[in-house]
Amino acid sequence: MEIVIATHNNDKLKELLKAFDSHFSSIDLLTLNDFPGVGEIIEDGKTLEQNALIKAREVFNLTGIPALSDDTGLEVEALNGAPGVYTARYAGEGCSYYDNVSKLLEDMQTIPAPNRTAKFKTVIAYKDETIEMTAEGIAEGTISRTSSGDFGFGYDPIFYIPEARKTFAEMNIDEKEIYSHRGKAIRAIMNTLIPHLEQVRQMTKKEKA
């Protein structure tokens, strides 16, 4: 069996592949790098779930192979839930990670410590010819006043996890997977996806027999 991880973001891909590899011992995980004809997918949904499903459906339709995708948003309480679905382009179209972090720190400059709470939310979506499914993972934290750490990507240097007393960027990939929104979403979807894939495998065996 094969599954395509539906993202062009290589930083996100590293985390997804590592997490899924631990669950899929007998499934070949492909990426969009294996399908150069698949261009950028327009994510015009109003929610993370809609965007995740848009990507999974589009990649499944283009490749004919079951697809897994995710969409992630940072929701800052003091900013009324922003940047939300605009997390990747908070500082504008074509912005860099640094641009987004700088804008968020500037927007939060006058916000006192008790009000700097935030949460990262990831929705994972799966699509094949018979089923669609989604699962959500949430990481609770705060927005720090300065960047700290050299690991990770995106807003990781300023997303502080009180329980771990570290920002995501101060955690290696194994530690981050424990606390992160993406790791939690992956573990959540596995509860439904693994039984489904086993059922598909058994049906395939019967058809070949």
Image (cartoon, rainbow, N blue to C red):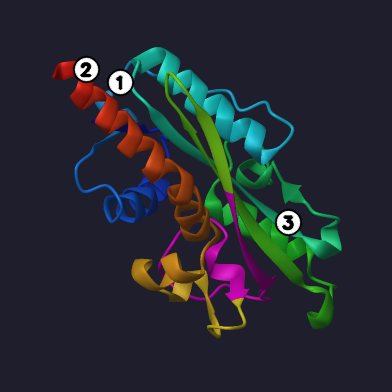
Question: From this viewpoint, which residue is outermost toward the left?
Answer: 209
Residue contact at pointers 3 and 2, CB within 8 angstroms: no
Query: On residue 36, which mark appears?
Result: 1
186 w.r.t. 166: above or below: above
Q: Residue drawn 43% across and 65% down?
A: 177
Residue 174's spot in the image, x, y percent?
Answer: 35, 69
128 w.r.t. 85: above or below: above
Query: On residue 84, which mark appears?
Result: none
Position of 3 compared to 209: left or right? Answer: right
Q: Residue drawn 66% across and 72% down?
A: 141
Which residue is nearer to you in this view: 198 or 87?
A: 198
Magenta-highlighted residues: 136-160
Which sits earlier in the primary sequence, circle 1 or circle 2? 1
Report, in whole angstroms, how far the alpha carbon at label 1 lies from the one at label 2: 32 Å
In this view, the mark in front (1 or 2) = 2
Instruction: Look at the image and tell me whether residue 81 can be seen.
Output: yes
How crowded pointer 3 is (Cα within 10 Å; few <14, some 14-19, many 20+) is rated as many
Q: Residue drawn 71% across and 37% down?
A: 47
Query: On residue 75, which mark appears?
Result: 3
Q: Per the image, is 156 magenta?
A: yes
